[in-house]
Image: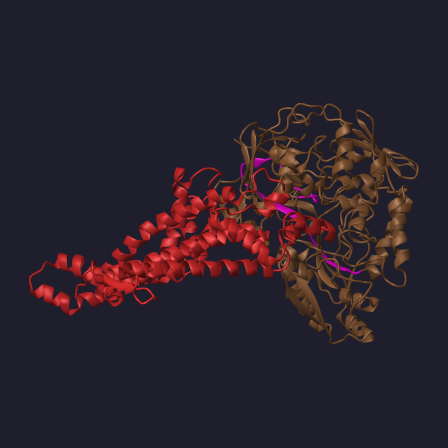
Amino acid sequence: MQVMLTAEVESSSARGGRTRRRVHPVAWFVLKRLALGAATLFVVSVLIFALTAIVPGDAVTVVLGKSGTPETIAALQAKLGLDQPLWAQYLAWLSGLVHGDLGVSVVAMINQQADPSIATALADPLANSLILGFITAVLLIPLTLALGAIAGLFADRFLDHSISVPTLVLGGLPEFVTGALFIYIFFTQLHVLPPVSLVPPGASPLQTPQVLVLPVLTLLVVAVGSGARQTRLGMLEAMRSDFVLSATLNGISHRRIITWYAMRNAVANAVQTIAQNLQYLVGGIIVVESVFAYPGIGVYLVNAVQSRDTNAILAASMILAVLYTVINIVADLLVVFLVPRLRSELV
Amino acid sequence: MGSSEGQFSGERGEISRRALLGGALGLGAAFGLGGLLAGCSTGGTPSSSASGGPAIGSSALPGGTPVRGGVLTLGVLTGGNEENLFPGLAIPNPDTARDYALYNLLFYPNDGEALYPLQPGLALSAEPNRDATVWTLKLRDGVTWHDGKAFTSADVVYNIKALWSDPTQNYASSYLVGLVKFAGVKAVDKLTVEIPLEVPSAQFPTIFAWFNFGVLQEGATPASIARKPIGTGPFTFESFTPGQKSVFNRNDNYWEDSKPYVDQLVVNSSFTDNNALLNALLGGQVNLMAAPAFSQVTQQVSAGQVQILRSAGASSTHAFSMRVDEGPFADPRVRKAMKLMTNRQQLVDGALAGLGVVGNDLQIPNVEYFASDLKPTYDVEQAKKLFQEAGVLGQTFELPTANVLPGMVEAATIWSEQAKAAGINIKVKTLQAGDYFTEAGGAYVRPFAQQVMQPIPSLTGVYRSLLQVGAPYWDTHWGAQKPGGAAANDLILAAEAELDSAKAADLWGQVQKQQFDDGGYVVWGAVPYIDFAAKNVRGLKASAAFNFNNWRFQDGWLAS
């Protein structure tokens, strides 16, 4: 049953309906998801801050290392505000964050670097990671749907097995194993691609696109399997469903049945899994960047953790959390738009 | 039944005495130019011998007529955001690689199997007065800074008084504080510096052969260096992005003739993983790889895809430390038993992949007066008997460890297994790597710990940093034990003060015998410095002092 997207409902305020607002149920759903996302990010920020505070030591003790005496460490901590109560440190950081200020790197300040701003230091790694993630996502979605649809249409036949088996096997391997396998094939044996993805500071990986191939391929292989499986299932169910049978009996062409009826069903089935795979990319990128020495936000975060650079950890973690949350919200919305039953439940 | 194990061997003591006597005579013996330059090269022989472990790699890459031009690109594991260009605040790798390119030390450790005699850097000689309480340094003439100014004694005086005396400006200041009378340091003339000391020190100049003592221009500060580093080193500054990449250009006015040979040095410190680093070397994106993992070294021995540089001497010592002044190890019988129960060869084979040599409970085997004649004994039954006498048989001791350097966690685990045979339990507790060697993390007050020592080229340096009362890394608290602590510390000070080489050898022999018998270290092994180079790199060497022979990239060139 098709539900009219233009249907509107009236919702009244708690004060006896004296002020009446007309809110679209989907808009209301979007607002709720955004509010929930914001609340999630707030909780995440508290958790990350608490975790960085619980771990013994801080940037000063780590950077001063062996030679830091209790006196010199205390003096530097006072200078950098690390002797303040935790809640005060958190509020100062949060206040900066909501004003778009990611703060300064404590480590960079200790080393008296000319520009200790985290925004400056994060700009290149973030851009590099976004490029890697975006290219992977752009390829992942159609690849997942195409492979899943083909496997579903040719279920239990050679084409299905030749898609399902490799994607499942490779998808089950950890990124560093898959990455090493690709390095062996494309560098050691074929000599066609570089084994590491070095990008000079200030340069874009798009200037040397060959460095992106193996990281993207590794992420794709790890992520594509589960989405394709769901698409295959959706396609299989659709092709065996009553509405496809009915459409066939009504003389609608096989191509139109596949592209218009069955594929929509398969996409709706796979969209949550694809969204989960996109969320996986946020974490998977960290591992893949390390395997290929790709200078992204993952490497930045690892370095920040090693040196206990709290502000840098918070900034990088929050950016990842925001990406994760946004993908989650977009996926939820896509599901609502793609699955009629869910839209009707909102009304 | 007891058995003796192989030891740090060689004739290093004889070489040193000859060198010292070649420079001066009797009391008032000096680190004259003759002594400094004596016996300083080993050539490119395969690294083997009892001192360096099994024959793997070579101590020098192939030579020939150097070819000018090209770019040397060093790949090294990242130091992250902590990386900086200020030598006083350098942490080993990759800061040191850059610092040795930009700056010079006053003296350098020897480039051979041993760490001595010293080699001249910006200082050509160091002469003591009669009782080694005042040292006079003669500086190299004709050296210019990267900005064209002349290097003079005023620069050295500034470094010692303003930078090297201050723990916030120099992590190694504790080597000099309490030893140097900073207020009295003065320039005698344009190329002569006089350094008065609080106490006599016969090996004083060796302290300057340490990576934190890169000489900066008068007036330099961490902030000025962060903006524009100026040194006297073989390469000039082009760019630096912490945790990623730095670029240096050939210094056309460098004081070593004809060097450097390459046009540019690039340090890529963006690697978080050794496998990625080796792949970059194999892929030609870097042509030098510092400090590969032990497993990569053994793999490359058979694969042969890269050149392996390996120092002839194994100088970086691995130890377990026990506090001698309090706690369970205050009883010398327990310390003795810990040494007896240690199967050192098993530790070297397991934790260092067989690439090191066994130790004899004494730190830094490649220095003058080192007691290589003292041989440890492996006797589990005797250890068990001593544990029983001390009343600790069956007890559990907690050993904190951390994955700070390769082999640490592995060694702790293997040792805990060995302890079971001797009737005690060692419970290994793994801590955060970043905190392990910090006071805030509990270092130097723990009763039981691990220690890995960076080579410093004299027993004075070793004992001032580890073992005499108040040392910055005083983890065994030697000298605070009762009874005998004060006398033991006095013996160290007497050995440090002795200028006569025969008497000094005797005193250092007594000091080391005490450590061997009663000290709080179980020094179970030492590793050489190992690096990788691409097949077309020439001229570089390995030494016991540091990676790539003190990161001497000015020696390197690329075969066409």
Task: Give percent across and percent down for residue B336.
Answer: 80, 66
Residue at x-position 29% and y-position 65%: A17
User: Which quadrant of the rendered structure holds the N terminus of chain B?
Assistant: bottom right
Task: Give percent across and percent down for residue B282.
Answer: 49, 44
Closest to the observer: B9 or B314? Answer: B314
Closest to the observer: B509 or A78? Answer: A78
Tell me the quarter of the picture where residue A327 sits: bottom left
Closest to the observer: B190 or B267? Answer: B190
Residue at x-position 30% and y-position 63%: A18
**Chain A, colour shown:** red
Q: Is residue B286 above or below residue A183?
A: above
Residues in magenta, as a range: B520-546
Task: Give percent across and percent down for residue A39.
Answer: 43, 60
* Chain colored brown: B
Residue at x-position 72% and y-position 47%: B455
| Scheme by which the image is coloured | by chain
Look at the image and tell me whether residue B367 can be seen: no
Q: Is residue A205 magenta?
A: no
Task: Give percent across and percent down for residue A218.
Answer: 39, 53
B448 sits left or right of B500 in the view: left
Q: Is residue B545 magenta?
A: yes
Tell me the quarter of the picture where residue B45 sits: top right
B387 sits left or right of B103 in the view: right
Look at the image and tell me whether residue A247 can be seen: yes
Closest to the observer: B505 or B143? Answer: B143
Residue at x-position 46% and y-position 41%: A199
| Count of numbered circles on the image | 0
